[in-house]
Amino acid sequence: MQKIFNRNFRGMIATVATASVLVLQPAFAADKKEAEPGGYDAATGKLLNEAIEMLNMDNYSGAKAKIGTMNFEKLSPYERSHVEQVLASIEHHQENYGAARNHLLEGIKAGGFNEQELSDIRYQIAQLYLTEEKWKEGAAALEEWFRNTSSPNSAAYYLLAVAYYQMEDFNKALPNAQKAVDLSEKPQESWIQLVLALYLQKDQFKPAIPLLERLISMVPDKKTYWMQLSSVYGQVEDYPKALAVMQLAYDAGLTSDDAEIRRLADLLMFNDVPYRGATVLEKAIDNKTVTVDAKLYEKLANCWIAAREYDKSINPLQRAAQMSSDGELFIRLGEVQIQREDWNGAAQAIESGLNKGGIKNQANAHVLLGVAYYNMKEYRKARPWFERATGSSQFGKMAKGYLQMIAANS
């Protein structure tokens, strides 16, 4: 997120810098022979105009050389201040931000700026600090500018918010970022992004919802905002809306990443729509938009099981069990086969699980295998598995009951 703000921030500075060339152009009468208050000596004005023309043609060395022919000691305060301003613009265009700032400070020191110009220059100095990523100095300069201006603009609040954000002073960044958005009729995307980031940084999820909805309305094809909005709804435990947002994004073709497809399937399961979750996963597998692994096949099988489509769950559960590092999923497959009354398939799956190892609840597996053999009337195979489970507090009573039935049938 921080890189996004840095890039947008530099773009804003670049735009201001381009516009500043026009601001720097002095107005003077070519036939003036002597300097007047607020004006230029004719010779000084001619040299300055020639320097600005070179600046506008990107001839920075020529512009600087032209100004270098002036006698700075004979310049009036007005002239000196504005010459320093032009020198600052030359340095700025060459990305010599420290030198540009020093020229502006010299311009202030000369005492030739009027109140409006002085305010604008102080604002530019703050921008230069921020361009150099001197966040503390830039924030201090902007705070001073705010104290001395009667009409602060939304861009200034945004820049101040960025400075505090970069210093990780989120408590000071948030109100300034919010002010920037509130003051602008059409705030930039990056401005809303910053407010959003600050709310999320503070785990304030509810205020983030309208911001994300606004961003989606501005750039509906940017899936990041859809994913974030669904995630935020999940954070506030509004899972139906979390699903609705993901489903809309999916229908619009925006959910193409592996993790996004899996999360959509999870939300469909959680919101009791497992059949759709299964079809989403199967389509993703067919389109090769997901990485096939044990977890994916298990998720698909669980969707079919939750939808009571036991027959459809067998193949993915078999694949998941084969790919898994332990035998747990084979035991799960055995349970499903018992639901289907496929006793032979259940026995094979459970035996595969026990052979693979890593079974956490051995007694459960033993009873299940005993049940499978019992229903195949293979009592001699069933008996030892039930006997192994008799010591279990959870399954002992069931195992003893089956042993009694086996004894009755023997």
Image (cartoon, helix red, strand yellow):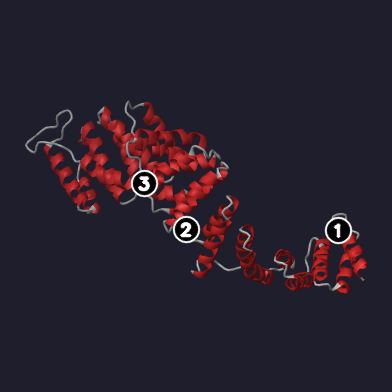
Q: Identify the residue at horizontal 25%, vertical 42% (top origin).
A: 20
Say what secondary structure mark 2 lies in.
Answer: loop
Viewer-side residue, 276 vs 189:
276
- Circle on res. 180: none
Name the quarter where the C terminus is drawn.
Answer: bottom right
Mark 3 sits on what residue? Answer: 218
Say what secondary structure mark 3 lies in.
Answer: helix
Q: CA distance from mark 1 to mark 2?
A: 47 Å
**Where is 402 relative to 16, above or below?**
below
User: Mark 1 Cα within 10 Å, few/some/many (few <14, many 20+)?
Assistant: some
Q: Identify the residue at horizontal 13%, vertical 42% (top origin).
A: 46
Circle 1: residue type: Met
Viewer-side residue, 193 vs 66:
193
- Circle on res. 398: 1
- Residue 105 in sight: no
Q: Position of residue 363 (x, y in %)?
A: 84, 62
Mark 2 sits on what residue? Answer: 255
Instruction: Please tell me which of labels 3 and 1 falls first in the chain.
Output: 3
Q: Are marks 1 and 2 in contact (CB under 8 Å)?
A: no
Viewer-side residue, 9 vs 382:
382
Circle 2: residue type: Thr
Q: Position of residue 10 (x, y in %)?
A: 37, 48
Q: Position of residue 406 (x, y in %)?
A: 90, 67
Image quadrant where residue 156 sits: top left
Q: Identify the residue at horizontal 86%, vertical 68% (top origin).
A: 385
Q: Position of residue 173 (x, y in %)?
A: 47, 36
Instruction: Please tell me which of labels 3 and 2 falls first in the chain.
Output: 3
Say what secondary structure mark 1 lies in.
Answer: helix
Q: Identify the residue at horizontal 60%, vertical 51% (top origin).
A: 270
Instruction: Please tell me which of labels 1 and 2 falls first in the chain.
Output: 2
